[in-house]
Image: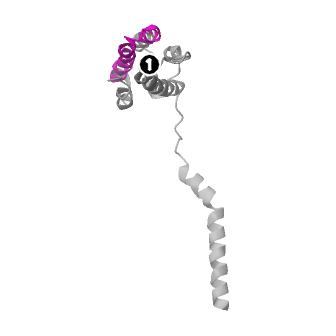
Amino acid sequence: MKLLSLTVLCLLFVLLCSCGNNEQTVNKHNEGFNTYEPSPLALLMRQMADEFDLAKVKLRNHMPLPDNFAEGFEAIKTAEPTPEKKTEVNTDTYQQMAEGFLAALQQLKTADAENINQSFNLAVTNCVNCHNQLCPGPLSRINKLFIK
């Protein structure tokens, strides 16, 4: 019985000690690693993709786009990119593509019911064209936005 009590006490002691050091172990393990923090441009583009996802559902159901659709998307021209993409984004090519996207977006917002799906796909095509040249990572998500 004494042996069992002593064993249980030792196990509890080990358990308590290991729990107390857990935070230090995790912090020590993560030293030197940076946690990913998306840039304002990356956040904006995620918001854009989310809004386009919702718009696609509405258009498929023959519903109008929300009045605030694409609000703030003009920030695509000025939002800060990730440091590794800064030199690619701060170019005339990027700015021209951003202008083309915004023009397609304006066309989408004013399109009649007969042409709205075509206008939607034109805006998505602008995204694909830019990402083909500058940042191909999100292309699989963008290609899912097309209305077929």
Above-or-below relation of 104 to 143: above
Magenta highlight range: 103-132
Residue at x 52%, y 32% (from the top left corner): 38
| Image point (65%, 75%), residue name | 12
> Is 127 within the magenta?
yes
Q: Position of residue 24 (x, y in %)?
A: 62, 56
Q: Is 106 within the magenta? A: yes
Q: Is residue 20 above or below residue 74?
A: below
Name the residue carrying label 1: 89
**24 lies above or below 18:** above
Instruction: Please name whichever residue, 131 or 108, is drawn nearer the observer in this view of the structure.
Output: 108
Neighbour tally class for label 1: few under 14, some 14-19, many 20 plus, Cα within 10 Å: many
Residue at point 54%, 53% (across, down): 29
Quadrant of the snapshot with the N terminus? bottom right
> What secondary structure is the magenta-colored segment mainly?
helix
Residue 135: image quadrant is: top left
